[in-house]
Amino acid sequence: MSRAARRMSRAKGHVGQPPVGGGYSKTPDQISGLHLWLKADSLTGLTNGDVVSTWNDLSGNNFHATASGTRRPTYQTNASATGLPGLKLNGAQGMLSAALSGKPEQTVIAVFKLDTAAQNYVNTIRGGGFKSLQLRIDGTTPRAVSAIYDGVGAPTISAPLDQVATFSYTYSQSGSNSMFRIDNTESQPVGGTMDLIDTQTTYIGMLDDGSDAFHGVLYEIAVWNRVLTLDELDAVIFALGAKWQNLPDPSAVLPQAPTVNPIGRYTTATPVVAGSAKIHEYVNVTV
């Protein structure tokens, strides 16, 4: 199935519903080139309402996110549909990591929940300094900006309020592979390039000056310094959907077994696998 056809299939389908497939979901560390990986369920020794000073990076690069004083987010138990914890930010908190935020090719995937009040604000998920790639939700519209470029948005898709969602953005300096996605719904490819430099640090939940801070809960953030393929994006997003949103895991869904119809003819629906275990096409076999 072509990229355009897969995009159309996702746009028509229910947001967040993965297609049938076997053994397809992958965690971020199973995709090569992982640069930063933060997840709330890795935090230990905390109780509900505790402030979080350090959020350890699990990518192996040790780009741990830190905060102090009133900028520390709070740990929230049972914050997701599956009972896992999250980091609560109320528009004044954020964390700093040494991970680079200005590489010419990037993929960022984040699991979050916007508060209802977030629709009135700019909500930064991944911020940075001058000439860094900053990802945010303007009200409910995904947007990517840099300090000297107004950036690009995806007005055709929106982030839900008071509901866990998975956000992704792929960026290429050439502009040929830039695309937003909320759960299983993609935007059209977005144009425009940003004059980025790769010496910037990463801010989680705010910009470098503390402005445009996030309103809601952050659960997991993964960053790669390359553009992930559609198959790789699907694999990670399906895994995160099962983990945080209690969505069906494609790896646990099997094709239907053959059945007998009333007139004694045998039919079966078998997925057509042509380089992808998730293609939405079937052949009917009659014996």
Image (cartoon, rainbow, N blue to C red):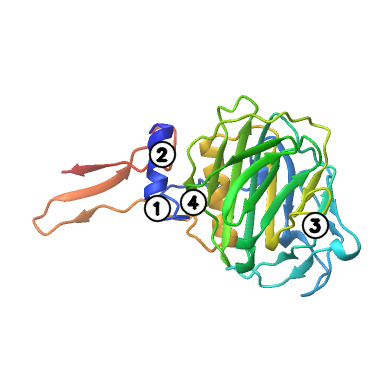
- Judged left or right of residue 155, residue 69 is right
Q: Earlier in the sequence, mark 3 or mark 2?
A: 2
Residue position marked by numbered label 4 in the rendering: 251
Instruction: State the residue at coordinates (30%, 53%).
Output: 257
Inspect the image, locate mark 4, and give the three-letter code of the amino acid beneath it. Answer: Ser
Instruction: Give the number of the mark in front: 2 or 4.
Output: 2
Residue 63 in view: yes
* SS for dot 3: loop
Inspect the image, locate mark 1, and give the three-letter code of the amino acid beneath it. Answer: Leu
Instruction: Give the number of the mark in front: 3 or 4.
Output: 3
Between marks 3 and 2, how big is the CA–CA gap? 36 Å
Between marks 2 and 4, how big is the CA–CA gap? 19 Å
State the residue in front, 256 or 214. Answer: 214
The answer to whether 280 is drawn above or below residue 114 in the figure is above
Q: Earlier in the sequence, mark 1 or mark 3?
A: 3
Residue position marked by numbered label 2 in the rendering: 6
Farthest-out residue, bottom? 48
- Name which quarter of the figure residue 113 lies in: bottom right
Instruction: State the residue at coordinates (64%, 38%).
Output: 151
Between marks 3 and 4, how big is the CA–CA gap? 35 Å
Q: Earlier in the sequence, mark 3 or mark 4?
A: 3
**Crowd band around label 2 with a 10 angstrom C-alpha radius: few (<14), some (14–19), many (20+):** some
**Crowd band around label 1 with a 10 angstrom C-alpha radius: few (<14), some (14–19), many (20+):** few
Residue position marked by numbered label 1 in the rendering: 254
Instruction: State the residue at coordinates (45%, 55%).
Output: 15
